[in-house]
Image (cartoon, rainbow, N blue to C red):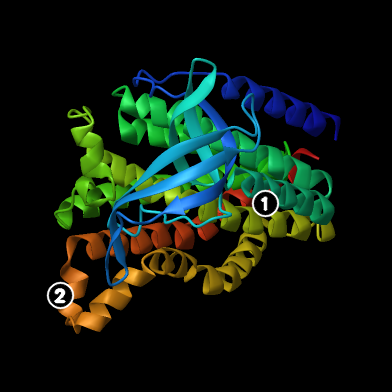
Amino acid sequence: MNREWIFSIILAGISIGLYFLDLSRAPRMESGLHARGAVIAVDNSKVRRNLIVKTEEQFLTVRLLDGPHASKEVSVTNMLTGKLEFDEFYEVGAIVLVEYDVRSGRPANALVRGYYRLRMELVLIGLFGILLIVVAGATGLKAALSFIFAAMVLWKIFFPLILRGYPPLLMGLAVVAVLTAVITFSVGGLNKRGTATFAGSMMGVLLTCGLADLFTGSFKLHGAIRPFAETLLYSGYYSLNLTDVFIASVFIASSGAVMDLAMDIAASMDEIKRKHPEIGLLEHIRSGLRVGRAVIGTMSTTLLLAYSSSHLAMFLLFMAKGMPAQNILNAPFVAAEVLNILVGSFGLVTVAPFTALVAGFLYQRRSKAG
């Protein structure tokens, strides 16, 4: 237990250090002060409406609610582009995030950056952390620290290094290896169970990476089919290998579910060994595989439901247009999701026997050593 608490303290310290790390060479967007604001007046006289689409300008008067210029009022022009996914239309009483400069001691050049959501996001994160700790105790605390660490590694290391030209596949595998090690050892413990979980997970991730690389070429896909990928190229990153970024996204997306299944198998085999220390190697592995078969029965649809639900509107549009199934499945962005689901599922299915084999040999070595 002392080792695990020391590990948790180190993990928390590294997460704090990563928060202050800056590896990005991207130019900084000029930004001024930020504050919450309340919309107190709206002028929609210039807004053009075409059914549900609104374009042109919406003029707002916003009173700042906090910051050094609290209670001051600013005028804001809200440009409506006609894109519902990006535009926000405000009414009196809306609480928004305001970005502004200061001129002659007064706020000026104000912009509205959307409804103010930061406070509720923090509340939701806090409730999630509390729930983890209440349900799982010390293990929940370590899981919360692992969650924060994973977010910091992706945001502060992986994304900036990809933009700086580092190979996406190697960086993706390195990041997944680090995150898998931290998460499995912090939750599973620095023991045989954690080791089996880590080894089984990485075997599944490596298989997923290889299959993603193989079938991306066979499907004639490229990374520009992802949202915002083309915009990223136009932002000056012409040398970025978007196809490798797409492949990395496939095995990174499935790595969490792979870890989850590996932990289930390793924990089951650990408990089996504790209750039946005399169990033989082959019988122990068969027990792990039986547990794996039961879990795979439900986990096999995990990626299907996760990915298809995120594209629900797209599938509804296809159905509304009466498109044939052949056309839908052959479309590049749908084929990309098929690859995502099936290749990720290969990793999920194979991680069960991988973990069972590793755990069987690890616990057999321990019993012989004892």
Distance Cα–Cα, label 2 vs label 1: 40 Å
Query: Is residue 82 found left or right of 175 in the rendered image?
Result: left
Where residue 322 appears, as percent x and y from the top left, is 19, 84
Residue at 75% of width from left, 31% of height from top?
Answer: 8
Evaluate whether residue 47 shows in this view: yes
Q: Which of 146 and 269 is in front in this view?
A: 146
Quarter that holds the N terminus? top right
Where residue 152 appears, as percent x and y from the top left, is 56, 32
Q: Residue 332 carries which label?
A: none
> Residue 277, relative to residue 50: is it above or below?
above
Quarter that holds the C terminus? top right
Q: Which of 332 and 110 is in front in this view?
A: 110
- Secondary structure of residue under mark 2: helix
Query: Is residue 81 found left or right of 264 in the rendered image?
Result: left
> Residue 353, relative to residue 35: is it above or below?
below
Q: In which quarter of the image is residue 369?
A: top right
Amino acid carrying mark 1 in the image: Leu
- Secondary structure of residue under mark 1: helix
Where residue 149 appears, as percent x and y from the top left, is 61, 34
Q: Nearer the viewer, mark 2 or mark 1?
A: 1
Q: Quadrant of residue 278?
A: bottom right
Amino acid carrying mark 2 in the image: Asn
Evaluate whether residue 192 shows in this view: no
Q: Which mark is residue 124?
A: 1
Of callouts 2 and 1, which one flags the residue occurring earlier in the amino acid sequence? 1
Residue at 65% of width from left, 44% of height from top?
Answer: 119
Q: Nearer the viewer, residue 221 or 356?
A: 221
